[in-house]
Image: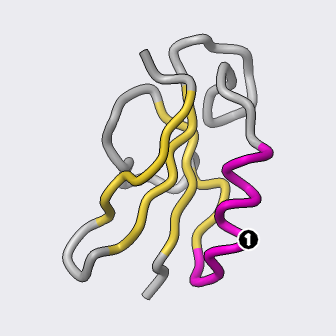
């Protein structure tokens, strides 16, 4: 299972699609690094959109739970 996930999103929920994913895997250090490097304000296709932010989620055995976020209003 992929423990960590980093996505570009426009709401506080983990998307079920693939376009938003910027990292998915089991390396916590790499996941945090990707999250820290991503800037909010870009959509899933890296086009300017101020409605988009970045979320960092962790798999809890049943679902992904958001642990960190930036840029969401």
x, y percentage for residue 8?
A: 57, 39
- Please say if 8 is above or below 26: above
In the image, taking residue 15 as reference, residue 50 lies left or right, namely: right
Residue at 57% from the left image edge and 55% from the top image edge: 6
Identity of the residue furthest to the top in this view:
50
Q: Main secondary structure of the magenta part?
A: helix
Q: Nearer the viewer, residue 61 or 28?
A: 28
Q: Is residue 27 magenta?
A: yes
- Please say if 58 is above or below 43: below
Q: Total number of numbered labels? A: 1
- Please say if 59 is above or below 70: below
Residue where numbered disc 1 is placed: 30
x, y percentage for residue 46?
A: 74, 31
Q: Is residue 29 magenta?
A: yes
Residue at 31% from the left image edge and 59% from the top image edge: 65
Identity of the residue furthest to the right in this view:
37
Q: Residues within 10 Å of mark 1 (few under 14, many from 20)?
A: some
- Please say if 58 is above or below 70: below
x, y percentage for residue 72?
A: 47, 23
Q: Quadrant of the C terminus?
A: top left
In the image, taking residue 39 as reference, residue 19 lies left or right, namely: left
Disc 1 secondary structure class:
helix
Query: Which region is colored magenta?
Result: 25-37
């Amino acid at each position: 299972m992929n423990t960590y996930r980093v996505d570009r999103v426009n709401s506080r929920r983990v998307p079920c699609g693939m376009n938003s994913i910027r990292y998915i895997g089991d390396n916590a250090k790499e996941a945090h690094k990707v999250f820290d490097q991503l800037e909010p304000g870009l959509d899933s296709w890296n086009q300017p959109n101020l409605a988009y932010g970045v979320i960092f989620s962790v798999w809890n055995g049943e679902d992904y739970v958001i642990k960190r976020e930036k840029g969401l209003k």
